[in-house]
């Protein structure tokens, strides 16, 4: 049993509150991590509002980074003292896992997004006092806490001098945007990519896109300061959707439309725009997560006429053990300046961090615990 302190959401719409918790002992393939830094992602806030039905009360947080304190008897990948990032988890035994597609693990929703416990139903976190329930195992970590119980599968070892407070968000938001571009859209030479949304995911997609042979990368958002940052980070054009008909503006800029679009906002009207803005045969990647049950209207008659391809993507379709070290190296070389997206907060400022991200002033809050 490990004593820890967590930021808990007690019920939908409630603030984060500090709760003393106990973590289970690491099982054979589990890893106990002392958290040094943890990023905040919109998915954490979507659970808080109830638009993702993760069971509450719960310890959220899924961009944790820290130092391994203990490992289960069967763990060989890391040892106590190693510094690690955490990403999503997967079962390792289903056909998608065994064929290199852990994001498509058949147990992915239960293990990461909806379950709240290990797959066998056992709890990883408990309150130190009182009988009220508490759910954890969010993305196999629940890292809005001083310590998290992860598994061998979702920790990635990094160098001893790695700046964890700059690397933590690679585990979800940054991987989601960058991987959508590098691993799925993979834009061809001379092509045009339009990214809808200049938040952490959209701007990470931009940071990736400037490392591809796409020659035009257009960012669409409603916030002028985010669009200014997008320009600074290499967007060739920006569109403020507040005062512009976005699809018409993209056609003005491109002629027939964009070869690739990427929807990162989770707004279904924007998804419609991202499909309508495609050139014939173009590809629209969808990473934005609207509330569960949301539906989108498309012009179905255009499907056999303009041949759009619409691809759902999560976690950048990445294998984190391979992908995160690549992002770290690109950053080290100055080719992936993710630092520009990050604002640091103390762990006990978690509520201000959430407000600043929600309000658009901050792109990627990272909480420091030490
Ligand atoms: C999530 C969004 C909700 C669906 C699964 C992937 N991505 C990151 O937080
Ligand atoms: Zn996330």
Image (cartoon, helix red, strand yellow):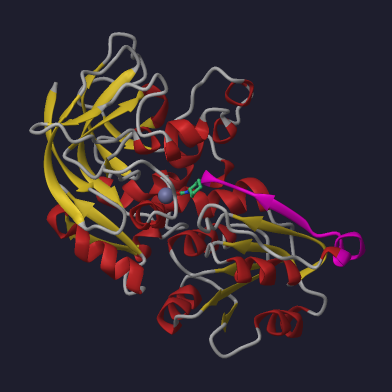
Direction top: furthest residue: 73
Direction front: furthest residue: 131
* Residue under the point 55% across and 67% down: 267
Judge whether residue 82 can be spotted in this image: yes
Residue 13: x and y in percent read 30, 59
Residue 269: x and y in percent read 62, 71
Residue 340: x and y in percent read 36, 65
User: Where on the picture, by quarter, is residue 148?
Assistant: top left
Give the total of numbered labels. 0
Judge whether residue 215 can be spotted in this image: no
Direction bottom: furthest residue: 243
Question: Which is nearer the eye, 154 or 23?
Answer: 23
Q: Is residue 305 magenta?
A: yes
Residues drawn in magenta: 301-315
Picture layout, residue 206 above or below residue 221: above
* Residue under the point 39% across and 54% down: 50
Q: Is residue 370 magenta?
A: no
Picture layout, residue 196 above or below residue 54: below
Quadrant housing the N terminus: top left
């Amino acid at each position: 049993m490990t004593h820890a302190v967590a930021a808990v959401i007690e019920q939908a719409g409630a603030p984060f509150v500090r709760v003393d918790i106990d973590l289970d002992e690491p099982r054979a393939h589990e890893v106990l991590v002392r958290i040094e830094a943890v990023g905040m992602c919109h998915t954490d806030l979507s659970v808080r509002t109830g638009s993702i039905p993760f069971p509450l009360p719960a310890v959220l947080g899924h961009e944790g980074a820290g130092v391994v304190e203990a490992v289960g008897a069967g763990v060989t990948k890391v040892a106590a003292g190693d510094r690690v990032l955490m990403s999503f988890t997967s079962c390792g035994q289903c056909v998608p896992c065994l064929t290199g597609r852990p994001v498509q693990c058949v147990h992915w929703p239960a293990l990461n997004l909806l379950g709240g416990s290990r797959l066998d139903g056992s709890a990883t976190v408990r309150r130190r006092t009182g009988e009220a329930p508490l759910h954890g195992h969010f993305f196999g970590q629940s890292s809005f806490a001083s310590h998290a119980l992860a598994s061998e599968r979702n920790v990635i070892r990094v160098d001893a001098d790695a700046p964890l407070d700059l690397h933590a968000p690679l585990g979800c938001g940054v991987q989601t945007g960058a991987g959508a571009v590098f691993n799925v859209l993979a834009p061809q030479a001379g092509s045009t990519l339009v990214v809808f949304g200049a938040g952490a995911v959209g701007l990470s997609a931009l940071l990736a896109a400037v490392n591809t042979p796409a020659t035009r990368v257009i960012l669409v958002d409603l916030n002028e300061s985010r669009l200014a940052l997008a320009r600074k980070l290499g967007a060739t054009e920006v569109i403020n959707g507040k005062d512009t008909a976005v699809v018409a503006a993209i056609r003005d800029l491109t002629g027939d439309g964009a070869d690739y679009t990427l929807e990162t906002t989770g707004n279904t009207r924007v998804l419609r725009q991202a499909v309508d803005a495609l050139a014939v045969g173009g590809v629209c990647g969808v990473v934005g997560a609207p509330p569960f049950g949301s539906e989108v209207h498309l012009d179905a008659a255009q499907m056999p006429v303009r041949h759009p391809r619409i691809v759902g993507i999560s976690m950048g379709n990445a294998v984190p053990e391979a992908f995160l070290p690549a992002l770290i190296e690109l950053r080290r070389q100055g080719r992936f300046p993710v630092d520009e997206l990050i604002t640091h907060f103390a762990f006990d400022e978690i509520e201000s961090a959430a407000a600043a991200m929600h309000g658009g002033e901050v792109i990627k809050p990272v909480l420091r615990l030490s």
